Amino acid sequence: MSRIAVIDHGAGNLVSIAQGLTRAGADVAIVGSPAGLDDADGIVLPGVGTTGAAMRRLHEAGLVSPLQSWARPLLGICVGLQLFFEHSEEDGTDALGLMPGRVSTLEDPPLLPHIGWNDVSFQPDPLFANVPSDATFYFVHSYAVVPEDQGVVIAETSYGQRFVAAARSGNRVGVQFHPERSGSAGLQMLANFVAETQRARNAA
């Protein structure tokens, strides 16, 4: 059984995420310090609110360096995905720098924040295995990632503009939407991440 650490940095749907991962067969621990990562096979970095507040909490908890050096599967959700990049224009925050690029406000949106269900156009990727192509996902945000390397983009959607809905670089994968709030399609994605951690564990 894979052990997955869900990072508690003070802002995230921790209970819903943990329930979805547990339902998929993972042993889940909500952690707030580097010691909680010691025997983890994967990490989920959730987030709501701002990148600045999330980064402050991660620095205070001593989790920035462990996350930057983490080589096993890592899933970022919403602000968690935004933290993967180098800099956020939201509040002038330097983030984790796991992928080159920035976080920028949505351009020409009908209304901010963007709240609601969207179709997502995704490429073949283990995270989207067995997810119906017509599935919709739940978004709550005003900012989106702008990668320097478009090769990391595995899903897109639109809200006033086309923007990145998911990105992957090796074992690091993140989504702008909330799978824990996205019904059966979102639960399938969490199960796919659990399976990814299990494959990585078996290959180690």
Image (cartoon, grey):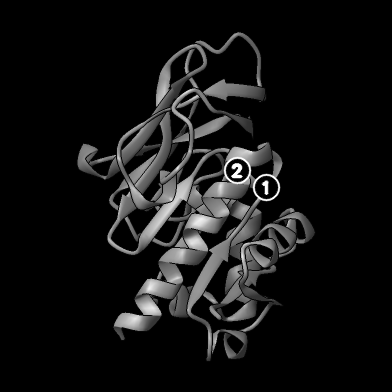
Instruction: Identify the image quadrant of residue 135.
Output: top right
Marks 2 & 1, CB-CB < 8 Å contact:
yes
Classify mark 2: residues with Cα within 10 Å, few (<14), some (14-19) or many (20+): many
What residue is drawn where x is 76% and y is 55%?
Answer: 16
- Say which label, 2 or 1, has the lower sequence index: 1
Amino acid at pointer 2: Gly
Image quadrant holding the N terminus, namely bottom right
13 over 158 or under it: above or below: below
63 over 165 or under it: above or below: below
198 over 183 or under it: above or below: below
- In space, the residues marked 2 and 1 are separated at their CA atoms by 6 Å
Can you give x and y, in whole percent of width and height, for residue 36 in the image? 62, 86
Residue located beneath label 2 in the image = 186
Front-lying residue, 87 or 119: 119
Residue located beneath label 1 in the image = 180
Q: Is residue 69 visible?
A: no
What residue is drawn where x is 49% and y is 73%?
Answer: 42
Can you give x and y, in whole percent of width and height, for residue 21 in the image? 64, 63
What residue is drawn where x is 68% and y is 38%?
Answer: 183
Q: Is residue 29 visible?
A: yes
Instruction: Identify the image quadrant of residue 10.
Output: bottom right
Q: Name the disc covering residue 27, or none.
A: none
Name the element at disc 2.
helix
Q: Is residue 168 left or right of residue 151?
A: right
